[in-house]
Image (cartoon, coloured by chain):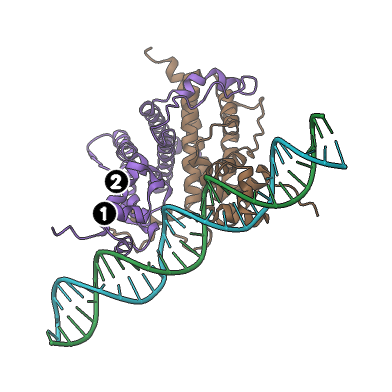
Chain colours: A brown, B purple, C cyan, D green
Amino acid sequence: MPTEPLSRTRIVAAAIDLIEREGADAVSMRRIAADLGVGVMSLYNHVPNKDALLNGVAEAVLSQIEFTDDPDAHWTDRVRMQARAFRQIAHGHPRSTMLVVSRQLHSNAGLLPVERALATLRSAGFDGVDAVRVLRMFIAYIVGSLLREVGVTPTFAPPRQHMVNPDDVDPALFPEVNALAPLLSSCDHDADFDFGVELLIQAITVLPKRKREGTR
Amino acid sequence: MPTEPLSRTRIVAAAIDLIEREGADAVSMRRIAADLGVGVMSLYNHVPNKDALLNGVAEAVLSQIEFTDDPDAHWTDRVRMQARAFRQIAHGHPRSTMLVVSRQLHSNAGLLPVERALATLRSAGFDGVDAVRVLRMFIAYIVGSLLREVGVTPTFAPPRQHMVNPDDVDPALFPEVNALAPLLSSCDHDADFDFGVELLIQAITVLPKRKREGTR
DNA sequence: AGGCTTGCACGTACGGCGTACGTACGTCAA
DNA sequence: TTGACGTACGTACGCCGTACGTGCAAGCCT
């Protein structure tokens, strides 16, 4: 039986699989090799080292984003769709999300979403400076949101439903936290994310206008 | 010479010191013990394990935030100040920032900023639901911003000024990225952060009004 | 065909990691 | 005095990433 030959692609896929099954901490070269039924050092014929392998994982996950961009739609809708598409990472690869956002990638994989977003913003009438600024703000918001989303749920194991345990907070020290504990504990990720995206879109909608009417 | 006795506080301080000097990867129980001139296993009399120690580091850094809240100021100014105060983490402890944002803390250390922010938002007239939503949005934005800020500069060693290397991007595939390469490469963190904060504040300023005038 | 180069799979080995466990020693209560 | 207790410490185990050397199979040149 001529087992399919080892390759960077197969190794990265095995790594992603392992991360999603057992979490990022479970990743080791030995473990990946075992999962592939292969000697540990064989991996190094296709991947320079573990760090590069993890970069490969991040790139692979990132490049799986499906952008269905409709050039005829209103630019606000296109921004909405792109933000949501990016967030799909957190659903398709929850345990890998941390990797994706915590490594800066100097490859084309990370550039495609940037390209799309910039094109959309430019077509909406933003000049270069504003497009870049707005893009950076969106990325910051999305990354922060994903981080909370996967951070609140590092593994689905513990039945710890409340992230703010009422027993732990002293009502005298934290009256607001105490009063709002039910709200802080429950968390509708979809609604929260959309709330922020809508607010951001609404904010940048009035931005160019304000600039045109400015003193300059 | 009666060397000061070991304590959780001293251990956490040594860990922070080590992280800021040599990065989070350099942290090991052996290394911390060596820096303290102490046996490795002595640490375990004051800290249950490495993970708890890193949580301690995150809490310590977080609790060093200086909130100078002026109750008489306009609520927008108070929000501004709190956002900036939080960002001070990235300046005071750049290499530890990743730790702070990547661990969810179930202690009071992380609750103080939350309490302050909720109080401010409530005093501005937001109801509980909106206050929590707005707070979450701000946290997401700030966390994402800090992450970029310290991610772009993991160590100050490499003379890699341009995060978008013009040689790497194919102008045909990425026309916008190519055209805006100079803007994408340069990065005024202070200005970018403030730009986002102002936009967010401006967005939430009109939020309650819109709600009151809404169909409901 | 015969020999040579090349590339991949693999085993071994080294230094470092987190930490379980047993021990020795100081201090304080009874 | 004696015992219990808390703290510092050494040793040891099973992991980790990876440098290095070996062997084998396929492709190439003559």
Residue A73 vs A32, above or below: the answer is above
Residue B22 x/y as whole percent = 35, 42
Disc 1 sits on a residue from what chain?
B
Cα separation between marks 1 and 2:
11 Å
1 or 2: tag closer to the N-terminus:
2
Amino acid at circle 1 = Leu
Location of residue A185 (image quadrant): bottom left
**Which amino acid, by three-letter code, is at mark 2?**
Asp
Can you tell which mark lies on residue B36?
1
Circle 1 crowding by C-alpha within 10 Å: few under 14, some 14–19, many from 20: some
At label 2, counting other C-alpha atoms closer than 10 Å, the crowd grade (few under 14, some 14-19, many 20 or more) is: some
Which of A170/B6 is in front? B6
* Residue B200 vs residue B196, the one in the foreground: B196
Above/below status of B143 relative to A38: above
Task: Choose between A33 and B150: the one closer to the eye.
Answer: A33
Query: How many numbered circles are shown?
Result: 2
Label 2 lies in what chain?
Answer: B
Task: Please state the horizontal and vertical placement of residue A13, each as a whole percent of the image.
Answer: 65, 47
Mark carried by residue B17 = 2
Q: Position of residue C20 (x, y in %)?
A: 41, 71
Residue A31, quarter of picture? bottom right
SS type, badge 2: helix
